[in-house]
């Protein structure tokens, strides 16, 4: 037991030394991950930040940090140049309409750049992102008459559904996360037949018109985020390539500009693999964002940029979290 404690203490000291080395010699940049700026009645995935809180957070960043664009960060990494101390990158995943309607006016008010990674399958449609579909169908819809549901390896016992709604919802999400997009959509279509299909305007993605207007802002960089938002590591090489390539091409065709940045859906180290890294290199992305906590420094892997997830925090909590992020190891 004493030996294990000693080994643990040594490991912690090594991690502290590594963090100090990275921050001292390579700079210290935090990449913040947002999804939505909205006031929602329900938010089981905790993806939304209230507009008022987002405004307070952005003002604090403006006054206390060096807010960089993703292109500036990519330049530092490609030239191995030390990043400015206390620097921050603001990023958004998915492509919700509120990124344009709510987040952009606040960013423009404070003259802050941000990168928005767009999943393209739901653009210009009434469809909700698949995790929002599951919330609406499994948590908010009326109890169905059907007792059992089974398709593509997903089994749902609906007999005690009213009692165990949230538990079943939490069980379904990780399964669909790793289900191939075509099969996942078949499951969603079948569940819509059971529960109903009245989508919510509050959960829609950007329209083509909104995306084009969005991309015109000098504070906005558009990146790709796959087509159907799968966990890429669950797919073979060809399906991964298709997912990334399609989203890149759709965005380039819509915006008439090169898409040079990308983020992995979900973004944990279990959600991408060596095939994914090869594809991102092959498609010549200037930077690729992941989703695990660490600072960015000049020697960071440009295809695995760490990010810190931001929740619906009051300003005091936001400040505390930023302080924690700067010492995360």
Image (cartoon, grey):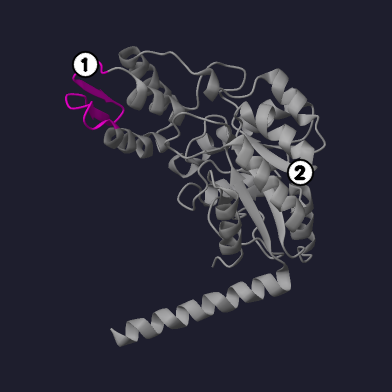
Q: Which residue is mark 1?
A: 146
Indicate the position of residue 4 as horizontal and vertical percent values.
33, 82
In this rendering, the label closer to the viewer, 1 or 2: 2
Up-down: is 329 above or below 63? below
Q: Is residue 62 left or right of residue 148?
A: right
Count neighbours of disc 1 (C-alpha within 10 A) and say few if under 14, some if 14 to 19, many if 20 or more: few
Residue 185 falls in which quadrant of the image? top left
Cβ–Cβ below 8 Å for labels 1 and 2? no
Q: Which residue is mark 2?
A: 113
Query: What residue is rendered at 28% in x and 33% in y?
Result: 168
Q: Quadrant of the N terminus?
A: bottom left
Query: Disc 1 on helix, strand or loop?
Result: loop
Indicate the position of residue 96 as horizontal and vertical percent values.
59, 29
Count neighbours of disc 2 (C-alpha within 10 A) and say few if under 14, some if 14 to 19, many if 20 or more: many
Q: Is residue 34 visible?
A: yes
* Residue toward you, 39 or 296: 39
Query: What residue is rendered at 38% in x and 33% in y?
Result: 176
Query: Which SS type dominates the magenta stretch?
Result: loop
Estimate the spatial distance between the alpha carbons at disc 1 and disc 2, rounded to whole Å.
49 Å
């Amino acid at each position: 037991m004493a030996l294990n404690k000693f080994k643990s203490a040594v490991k912690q000291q090594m991690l502290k030394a590594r963090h100090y080395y990275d921050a001292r010699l390579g700079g210290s940049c935090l990449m913040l991950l947002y999804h939505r700026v909205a006031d929602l009645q329900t938010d089981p995935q905790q993806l939304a930040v209230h507009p008022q809180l987002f405004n307070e957070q952005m003002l604090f960043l403006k006054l206390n940090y060096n807010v960089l664009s993703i292109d500036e960060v990519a330049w530092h990494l490609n030239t191995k140049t030390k990043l400015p101390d206390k620097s921050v990158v603001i990023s958004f995943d998915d492509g919700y309409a509120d990124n344009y309607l709510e987040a952009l006016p606040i960013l423009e008010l404070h003259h802050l750049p941000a990168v928005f990674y767009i999943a393209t399958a739901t653009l210009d449609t009434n469809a909700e992102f698949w995790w929002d579909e599951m919330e609406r169908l499994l948590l908010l819809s009326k109890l169905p008459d059907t007792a059992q549901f089974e398709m593509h390896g997903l089994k749902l016992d609906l007999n005690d559904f009213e009692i165990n709604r949230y538990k079943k919802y939490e069980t379904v999400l990780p399964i669909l996360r790793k289900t191939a997009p075509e099969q996942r959509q078949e499951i969603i279509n079948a569940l819509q037949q059971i529960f109903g299909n009245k989508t919510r305007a509050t959960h829609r993605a950007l329209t083509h018109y909104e995306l084009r207007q969005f991309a015109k802002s000098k504070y906005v960089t558009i990146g790709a985020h796959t087509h159907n938002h799968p966990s890429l590591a669950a797919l073979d090489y060809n399906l991964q390539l298709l997912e990334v390539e399609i989203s890149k091409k759709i965005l380039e065709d819509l915006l008439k500009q090169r898409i040079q940045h990308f983020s992995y859906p979900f973004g944990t180290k279990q959600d991408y693999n060596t095939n994914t890294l090869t594809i991102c290199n092959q498609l010549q992305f200037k930077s690729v964002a992941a989703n695990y906590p660490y600072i960015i420094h000049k020697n960071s892997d440009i295809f695995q940029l760490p990010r810190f997830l931001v929740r619906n925090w009051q300003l005091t909590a936001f400040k505390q979290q930023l302080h924690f992020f700067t010492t995360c190891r």
